[in-house]
């Protein structure tokens, strides 16, 4: 009953509504942008490796800035950091718009090559966007524990997951239609969505007083997030498990290639296929809202990661649109459970004064591993072919879940969230 009372009236809180509104607008913008960006890169080059390059260029800034981004999130007002970096996102979307406007009419790799169209500006803007996101993501993630009290955090995490799911459906579906009208139009919509997300995040009022980092900036302070993760088995195992699963199960990035080469469908069908993970996560979100995971939390996390791998195998082997769609829906449903559990475990186990730095490291391990997973998938598809790249990643994910079940007893033994103590920072 504690969770029910904690969650009652959550959306009546103005701070929660503003936080979720900002997340919804920003999340829709990102999912729309990535769906268009991956498709555009593949169409311009005709090479799956271009998708891998896009992923790598998003990943590298997160690694290079992990020390800085965590320190910034803990030292400054996380609302203002998020808003400032969102302005950077707006500028990047405008740059994508200008580039796409300039090359309007180029639809495939042969035409791009023959017309002398340079793809490097697309890569350069992606690199800048990755740098902006490397600062923005830890600050936004570290906001949640300040928006509500500790006992309501699992409810806010669940509400945030539903918001993220909705964005993951609306963005890609819109991308299919907008891209068929022109990539420049799609990027313009992205810029507007990012801009609209700024006022809401600035107006969030904290329910929990933050504990800002007050010491002089130093390498030791900046690295405390990494040190904390290393000495906290529950946090380390939850983050590492998702990192490896996302790294080898990064088939979403290959959907443009799957749609064209394996399924033979067009832009609009591609958009719906790209939305399938959001649909699967949304359906699972509804199930979790009615029946959340409250017991056997650790074992459940391990099982759903293995299920995630199983449906990547079916996705890699099929040439049927319906089977591919269902596989993406089911894999995303399993991932939704995994993300919800991890997104609750990590804040509960982390002191607020270190949450920004821990979130920055988590961003590299999890968020950025999406991009590194895209690089891995694109490279594997280039050299091994799409079926082996996707199905092989699923097999690797199952093996990883089994290995963690044996090697990480601290994670396996978690029964309820009450088993996760708030540790001392010393």
Image (tube, helix red, strand yellow):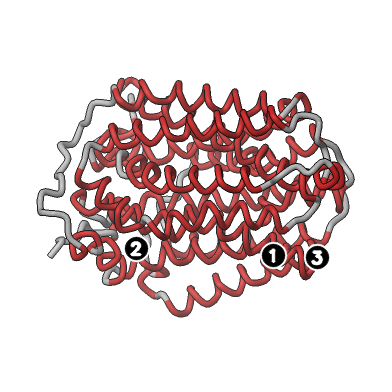
In the displayed structure, does residue 140 sit left or right of residue 168?
Answer: left
How many callouts does the rendering have? Answer: 3
Residue 322 is at least partly visible in this image: no
Kindly identify which residue carries mark 2: 235
Residue situated in front as seen by the camera: 121 or 167:
121
Kindly identify which residue carries mark 1: 379
In the rendering, at what x and y percent does residue 30 appear?
54, 36
Q: Residue at x 65, y 44 (%)?
A: 277
Q: Secondary structure at mark 2?
A: helix
Query: Looking at the image, is mark 1 or mark 3 earlier in the sequence?
Result: 1
Q: Residues within 10 Å of mark 2 (few under 14, many from 20)?
A: many
Q: Residue at x 54, y 70 (%)?
A: 401
Given this view, does label 2 or label 1 mark the residue nearer the observer? 1
Q: Residue at x 62, y 29 (%)?
A: 98
| Tag shown at residue 385 | 3
Contact, CB < 8 Å: mark 3 with mark 2?
Answer: no
């Amino acid at each position: 009953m504690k969770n029910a009372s904690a969650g009652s009236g959550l959306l009546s809180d103005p701070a929660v509504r503003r936080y979720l509104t900002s997340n919804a607008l920003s999340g829709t913008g990102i999912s729309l942008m990535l769906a268009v960006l991956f498709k555009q890169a593949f169409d311009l080059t005709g090479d799956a490796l271009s998708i891998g390059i896009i992923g790598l260029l998003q990943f590298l800034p997160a690694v290079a800035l992990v020390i800085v981004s965590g320190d910034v999130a803990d030292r400054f007002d996380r609302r203002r950091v998020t808003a400032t970096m969102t302005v950077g996102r707006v500028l990047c979307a405008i740059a994508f718009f200008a580039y796409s406007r300039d090359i309007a009419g180029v639809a495939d790799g042969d035409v791009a090559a023959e017309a002398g169209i340079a793809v490097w500006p697309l890569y350069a803007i992606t690199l800048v966007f990755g740098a902006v996101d490397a600062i923005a993501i830890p600050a936004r993630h570290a906001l949640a524990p300040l928006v509500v009290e500790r006992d309501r955090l699992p409810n806010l995490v669940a509400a945030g997951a539903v918001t993220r799911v909705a964005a993951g459906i609306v963005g890609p579906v819109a991308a299919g239609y907008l891209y068929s009208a022109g990539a420049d139009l799609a990027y313009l919509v992205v810029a507007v969505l990012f801009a609209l997300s700024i006022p809401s995040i600035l107006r969030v009022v904290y329910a929990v007083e933050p504990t800002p980092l007050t010491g002089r900036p130093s390498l030791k302070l900046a690295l405390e997030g990494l040190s904390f993760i290393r000495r906290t088995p529950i946090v380390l195992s939850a983050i590492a498990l998702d990192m490896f699963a996302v790294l080898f199960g990064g088939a979403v990035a290959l959907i443009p290639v799957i749609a064209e080469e394996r399924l033979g469908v067009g832009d609009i069908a591609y958009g719906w296929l790209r939305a399938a993970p959001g649909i699967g996560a949304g359906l699972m979100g509804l199930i979790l809202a009615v029946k959340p995971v409250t017991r056997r939390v650790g074992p459940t996390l391990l099982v759903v990661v293995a299920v995630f791998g199983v449906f990547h195998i079916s996705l890699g082997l099929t040439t049927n649109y319906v089977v591919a769609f269902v596989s993406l829906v089911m894999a995303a449903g399993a991932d939704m459970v995994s993300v919800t559990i991890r997104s609750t475990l990590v804040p509960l186990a982390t002191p607020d004064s270190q949450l920004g730095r821990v979130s920055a490291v988590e961003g590299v391990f999890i968020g950025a591993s999406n991009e590194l997973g895209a690089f891995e998938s694109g490279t594997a598809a280039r050299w091994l072919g799409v079926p082996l790249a996707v199905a092989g990643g699923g097999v690797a994910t199952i093996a990883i879940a089994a290995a963690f079940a044996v090697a990480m007893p601290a994670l396996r033994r978690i029964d309820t969230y009450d088993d996760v103590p708030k540790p001392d920072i010393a």
